[in-house]
Image (cartoon, helix red, strand yellow):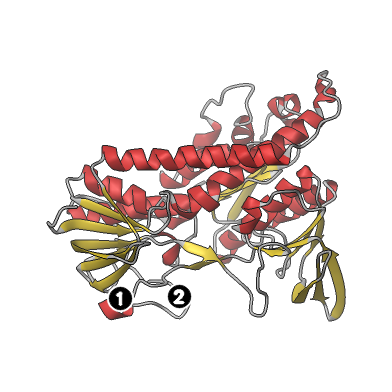
Amino acid sequence: MSDQAKDLVVIGSGPGGYVGAIRASQLGLDVALVEKDARLGGTCLLRGCIPTKALLHSADLVEEIRHAGDHGVVVPDVQVDFPRVMARKKKIVAKSAAGVNYLMKKNKIEVVKGVGRLESPTRVAVTGEDGTTTTLDAKNVMIATGSVPRLLPGIDPDGERIVTSDHILDLTEVPESLIVLGAGAVGVEFASIYGRFGSSVTVVELLPRMLPIEDEEISAEFEKAFRRREIECHVETRMESASVGESGVEITVEKKGERSTMSAAMLLIAVGRAPYLEGLALAGAGVNVDEGGFVPVNPHMQTNVPGVYAIGDVVATPQLAHVASAEAIVAAEHMAGVKTRPLNYLTTPSCTYSNPEVASVGLSEAAAREAGYDVAVGKFPFSASGKARILEATEGFVKIVSEKRYDQVLGVHMIGPRVTELIAEAGLMLQIESTTEEIARLMHPHPTLSETVLEAAHGVHGSPIHI
């Protein structure tokens, strides 16, 4: 390990931390990366995005094979070999973590294993598993420690009957029944996974609708789709207590003044994530933390201490891997003194990888109206798409929200097959301030699912072609 002061010490190796380290190295900075886990990659790679999407793909295959007879392909006696499903997930995670390790070596980034804390704005102490402490001097520090599952007062996950999103990724068998508390992206993704693996699933949500941050029409369509899959959905429902017995968990819930009980083999707490700042000693270094536990930053991701930056889930921006990566690049470029541009969070794509998939970017119809826009809306259903019919995936629609005066696209909202891939085009619409006419006049390949975006753009002007 070099005794020379680093230009940057990054604490945390998730998709924010390791991306920031790479970008800083590309710009000529001498970088060290501090990580407390045995492997690099952070929550997203080890306990979030990558393992959940591996499980979701296995669940997609199960469902597709069960309906393969509709395509003339008969596969008798379809079974889920759950241990092999989990083994495949672990293999993908291990290979991805090794890939991050390779990127650190390629970019000459020094990796220091242990728990980091700020002794000062320019000094990071790293305590390893053996208790020894290494001190790193740095011109800049990037806090990229991510988040952990948010817990509820009085509800203590035991990893067996009451679990978090961390626990449920390491099950050894599929629970016979599962209650999911929280109908955000994390909750409904696990509901979608285990429902198709054979669990009887119930989703409980405090707010008035499923996927409450999405456009209201998307939420309504999503709840219908889940009910068609025999997943119970209880919205405007508060869990008051949970008790563990020999055979499972019983919860007491309240809805509109009426109390009732539900029981299942397992309860998943999926009510969001909390910033993880444990052990960092930010106060001692003069770094502010707000009442919500987040680190305030300026548009260049600087904290109140100029040489200390914070990105990702520890700041009060969307808790998404791609947001953390983008913020890290802005921070690295700013500290390197090169031209950069603060993020436009309105272009943040939101993706839910359940079945059906949901994706959105920009303003919902309600938000656009509340902002004072004279709104025009275009919609096109996947049921009218030739490619969707080929895929036997005709649920859902694409919805474009625009304003009438300049025809500018304000938001795009999708539910249906592979929309988490389609949403990137919509993000570009907002980034370049596209009009719906420009989208409608852009040729889209046929037959593809992307044609639904084209048709929704035509729909804004009342002239869709194929419906």
Query: In which image quadrant can residue 389 be found?
Result: top right
- 227 horizontally vs 217: left or right: right
Q: Name the residue: 86% across, 29% down.
A: 77
Question: Residue at label 1?
Answer: 287
Q: Is residue 162 above or below residue 284?
A: above
Please state which amino acid type lies under the numbered disc 1: Val
Which x, y percent locates residue 254?
A: 81, 77
Which x, y percent locates residue 66?
A: 81, 31
Q: Which mark is residue 116?
A: none
Which x, y percent locates residue 265?
A: 80, 60
Please state which amino acid type lies under the numbered disc 2: Gly
* Residue placed furthest toward the top: 72
Earlier sequence position, callout 2 versus callout 1: 1
**Residue 35 or 403: which is nearer the viewer?**
35
Check the picture and name the quadrant holding the C terminus: top right
Which x, y percent locates residue 250?
A: 82, 70
| Badge 2 density bin: few <14, some 14–19, many ≥20, Cα 10 Å | some
Q: Is residue 34 above or below residue 454?
A: below
Regarding mark 1 in the picture, which secondary structure is present there? loop
One can see residue 40 in this view: yes
C-alpha gap between disc 2 and disc 1: 12 Å
- 123 horizontally vs 352: left or right: left
Question: Residue at label 2?
Answer: 293
One can see residue 411 in this view: no
Q: Name the residue: 57% across, 59% down.
A: 368
Query: In which image quadrant can residue 79 be found?
Result: top right
Regarding mark 2 in the picture, which secondary structure is present there? loop
- 75 horizontally vs 297: left or right: right
Q: Name the residue: 25% across, 73% down.
A: 119
**Residue 331 or 245: which is nearer the viewer?**
245
* Residue placed furthest toward the left: 4
